[in-house]
Image (tube, helix red, strand yellow):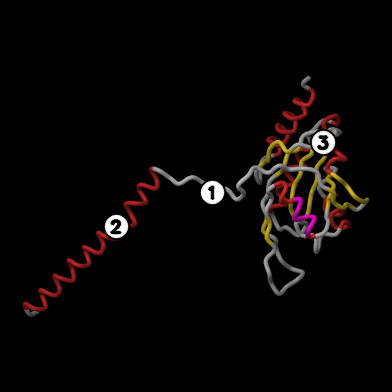
Amino acid sequence: MTNTQKTVSIGLSLFGALLLACLFYLFIEPTKDTEKNPPPPQAITSEKPTGGNFTLTALDGQHSLSDFKDKLVLLYFGYTYCPDICPTDLGNLSMAYQHLTDAEKSNIQILFVTVDPARDTAKRMAEYTQYFNANIIGLTGTEQKIAAVTQKYGAVYLKPEQENKENYTVDHSAFIYVIDKNGQLQTQLPHAISPQQIQNTIRTYLTQDKTP
């Protein structure tokens, strides 16, 4: 290798080292600062969901949330063709319900609202909810009505656009909304919460309702 080639090679090596150092400073070092001072989380919605009354359709006719004003309501949004999330959460709700006393069962109502009204008719909702044996009322309605209800409770869902109009999945949030006997949204329970935790929540709110 000639002296000129050696000079060029050394120059390229130094340039490469300098470039790596710059990249380290620009990208690696800021990451450390970010870990020490992480940015605040960004919420999907800017305001806490307010909940509120709504009216949708079941197999036996119209039902409003206000119809259950004397009961603790557990509200869940999903759809009957859901492959795993809805069966898990409704199954846990069912197991929790099965281990309540008769008096406790008489003071709660589980509502299952579809986010796929195009396929989930009132009849299909009724057939599907019967599998869980937990006195669940399946509710459906127009796309506009479903959108209005989900907005009240901060639930989100997305039906992907695809060619197959019959076989598709709907992405959706998976919370159980706890609504007190006055129709007020109190809290929400996360996906896959255990039956025991659901029972504890139910009993907590039923006990509060008895407190003078």
Q: For marks 2 and 3, give the one nearer the viewer.
A: 2
The image shows residue 105, relative to residue 159, as above or below, that is: above
Residue 100: percent from the left, percent from the top? 80, 33
Q: Earlier in the sequence, mark 2 or mark 3?
A: 2
Q: Give the Cα separation between the discs numbered 1 and 2.
A: 28 Å
Residue 50: percent from the left, percent from the top? 71, 42
Rendered-image quadrant of the N terminus: bottom left
Question: Which residue is identified by label 2?
Answer: 24
Q: Give the Cα separation between the discs numbered 3 and 1.
A: 34 Å
Question: Which residue is identified by label 1?
Answer: 42
- Near mark 3 (Cα within 10 A), the count class, few <14, some 14-19 or many ≥20, is many
| Among the 4 quarters of the image, the one containing residue 94 | top right
Q: Which residues are magenta?
A: 144-149
Q: For marks 3 and 1, give the one nearer the viewer.
A: 1
Q: Which amino acid type corresponds to the residue marked 3 in the rendered image? A: Ile
Residue 5: percent from the left, percent from the top? 11, 78
| Among the 4 quarters of the image, the one containing residue 67 | top right
The residue closer to the viewer here, 165 or 56, is 56
Left or right? Give the position of 29 relative to 184: left
Q: Give the Cα separation between the discs numbered 2 and 3.
A: 58 Å
Q: Does the residue at mark 1 contact the one at mark 2 (Cβ under 8 Å)?
A: no
Q: Earlier in the sequence, mark 3 or mark 1?
A: 1
User: Does dot 3 land on a helix, a strand or a loop?
Assistant: strand
Left or right? Give the position of 16 relative to 66: left
Question: Which residue is identified by label 3?
Answer: 108
Left or right? Give the position of 9 relative to 143: left
Q: Is residue 107 magenta?
A: no
